[in-house]
Image (spheres, grey):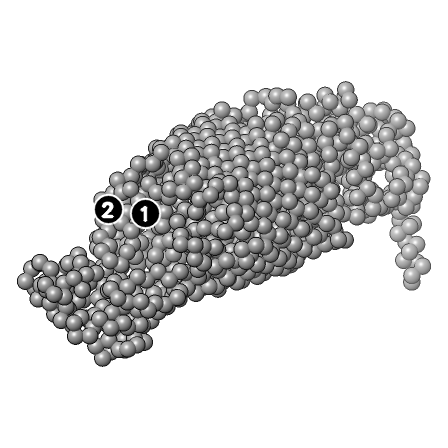
């Protein structure tokens, strides 16, 4: 029974692969556009909205979504296909085969990539980082709080690797990075120690540290000391962070649009989106005595700084 | 750098961005549901937008000051007059009034008033909170009955203890020094899923002042122990509970001050010490209905137990029923006779009405027949006071620019004392309050409110308050404030029924071993509330580039219907006949020069004028403080403070405090060794003539281990 049950899906996948290859080939002959295949473990209204928006943006391409379960091994997909991965299970699937089409990996953070890939960047894969770039977050901090010098950062064993880069990014901005290791989030002492020695807190996109359980204590403790938290994402700004940069669907569409116009061979191995927005919490700003910021103008100042470093 | 003009649409945009449907549909925004923590109801105004003057003493300052008492910390608040009745009784008043009865300020610990229920005073040394548990002290300099209830007449001192979630781990501290200083503190904090706890034990001991006006040893040392438990528990996303238990037990020495009324009495007791026990418990339920609407209900129970029995000696005639009658008839006549018995023995009772003279002659006859003999007995001047308080406060953010804080409060006070009240006296208070904050524009902020209060013993009153803030920008604001406030006379002032039942009499008085002393004093019972009208102009600014925070205030305050008569058991005739007026200016400056240096200056000029000279006693025309905190690196830090006032109750006060500390890392633990030197610069007693130190300097050391 067992060998057969293993064989059956493989056979099915092969058949699907052949059909796909033929279909792709036929489509390729009839139209000049590329075959853009998006995949993820789960379909959802969010996925559908995104696919719809991407196809509207690229009318000459064949943009389609196929759930992960229905796909063969990556090597059996036509090499001309441009594959876009929407989640981590699809990345795992893609990694099982070193062959396969050029692939853009969306919705993956530096931290997640490090946990899955260690330091190895697999061939044919472009990792598009979902977490805001550290330098951008630091520059945002500098821009809205020009008087701060000491930037407090909590980290754990997963996010520790980001510190070196963070320090390097802080140097030209005249900021000092103060760090505290926080392995056990039910013990508030590292947070207290950090609050004592910093002017502002910068949150790394580390879900072990910044999650619904820790949000209350983090935000109330820092606010209690009249200290702002920057980052880690838009959701946290709603909860009480002062501000963060983030990229939403429209930003990612612009990034993808740009990449898909280029031959896959020129795709970068990793990329932070150059399209982004700034979100602030005006009520928190007001309470901390900080000028209400014009988010669009702050974002364009940041963009300007990035294009002319 | 400059930002574009603030867009009035930004909140709308924010709402659009985060409308649930959009958020759920955007694959790239974090879809994990996160509670909104810093909601419109939880956020406070920025310093420039506060409708009044506020001084915040943060934990860094509290620690650097090296102070062992909350009252000493208040020297850092401009306009605060800090003195001592004796070594274990501080007298603290904002701007002034009477030096021995500081009772015109509200003092709260985590929202619970520690104003004594019956004898409306604050026993600073007996407050059941250790300095090490204090996160910060917010002092609202000015009347604010709308937010804090009656008795927030001249200022409000809001002591906020460390959140249990912020005090994890173990702390142990010992302090030893000259003048018998011997303190300890130990705390343990821990957290679990959704909850946190802090348990702390502490103790304090010192000798108080060294000598009285005659150079004799001054009996005013203290010894106390405290227990504190604070727990917070999150019930779900919208509800949480905080509860606390506090207890304090200790002894405060009091010098023996009884002076026999009758001549020829030489026997005396040697002390009138107080055993002071304070207990408190509170429970608060917080409910966030939505990000724009939250409320809490806080219930608390407090008990003050002051046990004070002492031995008094006087002539047997003190217990004469005829003398008691005479006192009731005419206390002046009775006192004149009592103090001059020998003089009237020959000629007979002094001139007066026929009844007075008849009673007087009977007393003189008793005197001649042996009632001049010395009797000693126990006087029980104990008092037990209780308070139960229930408060509901609702915060509603009606729009981005309109916020309403409203609530109700019920309080039950009871005082039980044979000596003061001839039994038990109680009072109930109902209070309702509301305050509206309206941000009319980016620059204009209007805040106004009123409180209505009805007390069983003193009737009802309504007090309004209105403030206008003009924000030049979010960090710099000008303010104009008008407020009215009231202080209800306390049970002691209004309803005292003061007499001494003396027990264990040796030998017996008129055949009795327990008898009532002839002096009896009753409060008028119909006292009205004191009323304050306060006007204030101020500026608050924070220069972010310099790290400099400045607050300047001009004020003109009037108190009418003032009860100024000292509380004495002979001839206490309380009335609302007095008035006071305070005007002047105050400045505070807090400057973080660098990461290592912090400079802090305060200065107050107060001009006081009072119809009763006693109410001018506790006002220093010029007072202030200066502080310099520095972090020298490698674990070393220092603090230097100067405190001065030109005359408090007639005595100058100037002192320099230095604290030097070294922090030593011991693996995961850290040890801090610190030394504090306080050097008096003047040669005067402290506030009262009996408060003298042999040496002008005191030195104490502390070691604190944290892990």
Question: What residue appears at the point 24 percent right and 78 percent down from the top-left corner?
Answer: B512
Q: Is residue A229 above or below residue B123?
A: above
The answer to which of B78 and B144 lies nearer the viewer is B78
Residue B370 location in percent, x, y?
A: 20, 74
Q: Is residue B604 above or below residue B139?
A: above
Location of mark 1 (residue): B487
Location of mark 2 (residue): B576
Residue B399 location in percent, x, y?
A: 47, 36
Report whether B29 appears left or right of B621: right
Residue B636 location in percent, x, y?
A: 69, 43
Q: Is residue B455 above or below residue B579?
A: below
Quarter of the image for the N terminus of chain B: give it.
top right
Question: What residue appears at the point 39 percent right and 66 percent down from the top-left corner?
Answer: B270
Residue B198 location in percent, x, y?
A: 59, 58
Query: Residue B369, located in which quarter of the rendered image?
Result: bottom left
Q: Is residue B676 visible?
A: yes
């Amino acid at each position: 029974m067992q060998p057969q049950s293993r064989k059956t899906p493989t056979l099915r996948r092969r058949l699907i692969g052949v059909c796909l290859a033929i279909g792709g080939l036929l489509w390729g002959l009839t139209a000049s556009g590329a075959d853009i295949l998006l995949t993820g473990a789960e379909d959802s209204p969010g996925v559908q909205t995104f696919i719809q928006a991407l196809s509207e943006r690229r009318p000459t391409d064949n943009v389609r979504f196929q759930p992960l379960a229905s796909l063969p091994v990556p090597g059996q997909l036509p090499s001309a296909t441009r594959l876009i991965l929407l989640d981590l299970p699809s990345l795992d699937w893609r990694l099982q085969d070193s062959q396969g089409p050029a692939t853009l990996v969306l919705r993956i953070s530096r931290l997640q990539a490090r946990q899955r890939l260690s330091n190895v960047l697999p061939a044919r894969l472009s990792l598009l980082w979902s977490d805001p770039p550290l330098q951008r977050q630091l520059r945002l901090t500098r821009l809205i709080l020009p008087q701060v010098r000491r930037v407090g950062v909590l980290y754990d064993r997963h996010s520790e690797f980001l510190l070196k880069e963070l320090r390097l990014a802080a140097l030209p901005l005249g900021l000092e990075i103060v760090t505290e290791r926080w392995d056990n989030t039910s013990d508030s002492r590292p947070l207290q120690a950090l609050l004592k020695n910093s002017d502002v807190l910068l949150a790394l996109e580390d879900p072990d540290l910044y999650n619904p359980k820790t949000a209350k204590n983090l935000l109330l403790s820092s606010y209690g000391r009249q200290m702002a938290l920057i980052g880690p994402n838009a959701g946290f700004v709603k909860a009480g962070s002062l501000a963060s940069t983030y990229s939403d669907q429209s930003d990612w569409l612009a990034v993808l649009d740009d990449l898909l116009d280029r031959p896959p061979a020129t795709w970068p191995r990793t990329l932070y989106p150059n399209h982004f927005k700034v979100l602030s919490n005006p009520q928190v700003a007001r309470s901390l005595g900080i000028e209400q910021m014009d988010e669009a103008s702050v974002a364009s100042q940041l963009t300007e700084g990035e294009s002319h470093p | 750098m400059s930002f574009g003009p603030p867009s009035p649409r930004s909140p709308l945009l924010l709402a659009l961005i985060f409308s649930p449907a959009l958020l759920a549909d955007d694959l790239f925004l974090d879809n994990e549901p996160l509670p909104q923590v810093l909601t419109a109801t939880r956020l406070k105004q920025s310093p420039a937008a506060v409708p009044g003057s506020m001084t915040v003493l943060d934990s860094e300052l509290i620690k650097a000051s090296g102070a062992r008492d909350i009252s000493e910390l208040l020297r850092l608040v401009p306009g605060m007059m800090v003195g001592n009745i004796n070594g274990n009784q501080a007298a603290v008043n904002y701007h002034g009034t009477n030096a021995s009865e500081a009772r015109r300020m509200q003092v709260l610990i985590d929202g619970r008033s520690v104003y004594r229920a019956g004898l409306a005073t604050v026993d600073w040394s007996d407050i059941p909170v250790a300095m090490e548990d204090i996160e910060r002290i917010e002092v609202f300099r000015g009347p604010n009955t709308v937010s804090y209830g009656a008795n927030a007449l001249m200022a409000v001192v809001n002591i906020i203890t460390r959140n249990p979630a912020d005090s994890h781990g173990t702390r142990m501290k010992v302090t030893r020094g000259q003048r018998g200083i011997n303190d300890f503190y130990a705390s343990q904090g821990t957290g679990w899923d959704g909850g946190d706890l802090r348990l702390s034990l502490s103790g304090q001991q010192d000798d108080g002042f060294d000598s009285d006006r005659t150079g004799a040893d001054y009996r005013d040392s203290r010894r106390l122990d405290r227990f504190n438990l604070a727990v917070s528990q999150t019930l779900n996303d919208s509800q949480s509970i905080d509860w606390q238990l506090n207890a304090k037990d200790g002894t405060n020495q009091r010098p023996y001050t009884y002076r026999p009324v009758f001549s020829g009495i030489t026997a005396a007791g040697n002390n009138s010490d107080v055993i002071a026990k304070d207990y408190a418990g509170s429970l608060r339920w917080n409910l966030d209905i939505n990000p724009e609407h939250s409320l809490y209900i806080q219930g608390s129970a407090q008990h003050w137990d002051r046990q004070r029995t002492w031995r008094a000696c006087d002539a047997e005639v003190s217990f004469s029923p005829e003398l008691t009658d005479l006192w009731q008839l005419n206390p002046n006549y009775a006192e004149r006779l009592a103090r001059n018995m020998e003089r009237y023995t020959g000629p007979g009772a002094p001139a007066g009405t026929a009844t007075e003279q008849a009673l007087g002659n009977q007393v003189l006859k008793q005197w001649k027949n042996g009632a001049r003999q010395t009797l000693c007995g126990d006087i029980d001047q104990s008092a037990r006071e209780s308070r139960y308080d229930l408060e509901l406060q609702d915060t509603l953010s009606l729009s981005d620019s309109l916020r309403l804080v409203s609530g109700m409060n019920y309080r039950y006070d009871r005082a039980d004392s044979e000596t003061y009240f001839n039994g038990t006296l109680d009072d109930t208070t109902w209070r309702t309050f509301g305050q509206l904050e309206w941000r009319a524009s980016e620059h204009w902020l209007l805040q106004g409110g009123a409180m209505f209060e009805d007390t069983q013993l003193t009737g009802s009153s309504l007090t309004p308050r209105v403030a206008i803030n003009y924000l030049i920008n979010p960090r710099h604001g000008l303010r104009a404030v008008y407020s009215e406030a009231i202080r209800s006379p306390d049970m002691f002032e209004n309803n005292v029924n003061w007499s001494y039942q003396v027990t264990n009499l040796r030998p017996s008085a008129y055949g009795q071993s327990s008898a009532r002393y002839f002096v009896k004093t009753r409060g008028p019972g119909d006292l009205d509330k004191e009323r304050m009208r306060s006007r204030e102009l101020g500026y608050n600014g924070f220069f972010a580039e310099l790290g400099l925070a400045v607050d300047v205030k001009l004020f003109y305050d009037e108190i009418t219907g003032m009860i100024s008569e000292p509380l004495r058991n002979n001839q206490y005739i309380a009335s609302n006949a007095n008035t006071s007026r305070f005007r002047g200016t105050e400045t505070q400056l807090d400057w973080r020069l660098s990461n290592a240096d912090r400079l802090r200056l305060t200065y107050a000029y107060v001009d006081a004028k009072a119809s009763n000279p006693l109410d001018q006693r506790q006002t220093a025309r010029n007072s202030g403080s200066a502080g310099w905190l520095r972090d020298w690196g490698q674990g070393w830090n220092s603090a230097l403070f100067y405190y001065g006032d030109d005359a408090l109750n007639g005595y100058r006060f100037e002192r320099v405090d230095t604290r030097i500390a070294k922090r030593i890392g011991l693996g995961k633990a850290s040890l801090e060794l610190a030394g504090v030197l306080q050097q008096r610069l003047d040669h005067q007693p402290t506030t009262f003539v009996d408060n003298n130190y042999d040496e002008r300097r005191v030195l104490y050391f502390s070691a604190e281990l944290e892990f």
